[in-house]
Image (tube, helix red, strand yellow):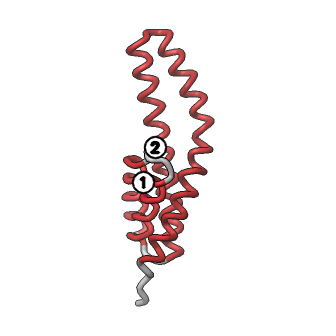
């Protein structure tokens, strides 16, 4: 169930990552709600936030480089490549940003749906 929560949370994160602060919180909340329990919710929220944030940054940088190459020729491709390299350094920061907010959302989701005892 944890793996399913992480996958769904990462997909939601990739879709909602353009919404500042609320996107990662909602994605972490969904992952924590699926995982159930505070501990699993924290882990699912953090992992989905981190994975989804990295996917979103890579996709945004790739799309920018491709459009730069098509619209401005070799110069645009160079600028796109340089901006991609600069954004590559931002992947760590985005991982921390999306991961932390996913962690907080996962905690709220895990609190809302407590873990069942068997």
Determine crowd level at label 2: few under 14, some 14-19, many 20+ residues with C-alpha closer than 10 A.
Answer: some
Residue highlighted by disc 2: 55
What is the x, y in percent for residue 102? 51, 59
What is the x, y in percent for residue 14? 41, 47
User: Which residue appears farthest toward the bottom when viewing the image?
Assistant: 118
Q: Choose the circle earlier in sequence order: 1 or 2.
A: 1
For numbered disc 1, what is the local secondary structure?
helix
Cβ–Cβ under 8 Å for marks 1 and 2: yes
Label 1 and label 2: CA atoms lie apart by: 8 Å
Image quadrant in which you'd find residue 99: bottom right
Q: Which mark is residue 10?
A: 1
**Is 1 rendered above or below residue 102?**
below
Near-viewer residue (23 or 76): 23
**Is 36 rendered above or below residue 91?**
below
For numbered disc 2, what is the local secondary structure?
helix
In this picture, residue 44 sits left or right of residue 91? left
At 48% from the left and 31% from the top, the residue drawn is 61
**Is 105 rendered above or below residue 68?**
below
Quadrant where the C terminus lies?
bottom left
């Amino acid at each position: 169930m944890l793996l399913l929560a992480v996958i769904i949370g990462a997909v939601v994160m990739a879709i909602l990552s353009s919404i500042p602060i609320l996107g990662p919180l909602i994605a972490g909340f969904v992952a924590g709600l699926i995982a159930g329990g505070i501990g699993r919710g924290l882990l699912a929220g953090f992992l989905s936030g981190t994975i989804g944030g990295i996917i979103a940054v890579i996709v945004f940088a790739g799309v920018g480089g491709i459009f730069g190459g098509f619209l401005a020729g070799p110069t645009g491709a160079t600028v796109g490549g340089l901006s991609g390299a600069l954004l590559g350094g931002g992947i760590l920061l985005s991982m921390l940003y999306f991961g932390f907010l996913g962690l907080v959302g996962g905690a709220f989701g895990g609190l809302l749906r407590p873990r069942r005892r068997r």
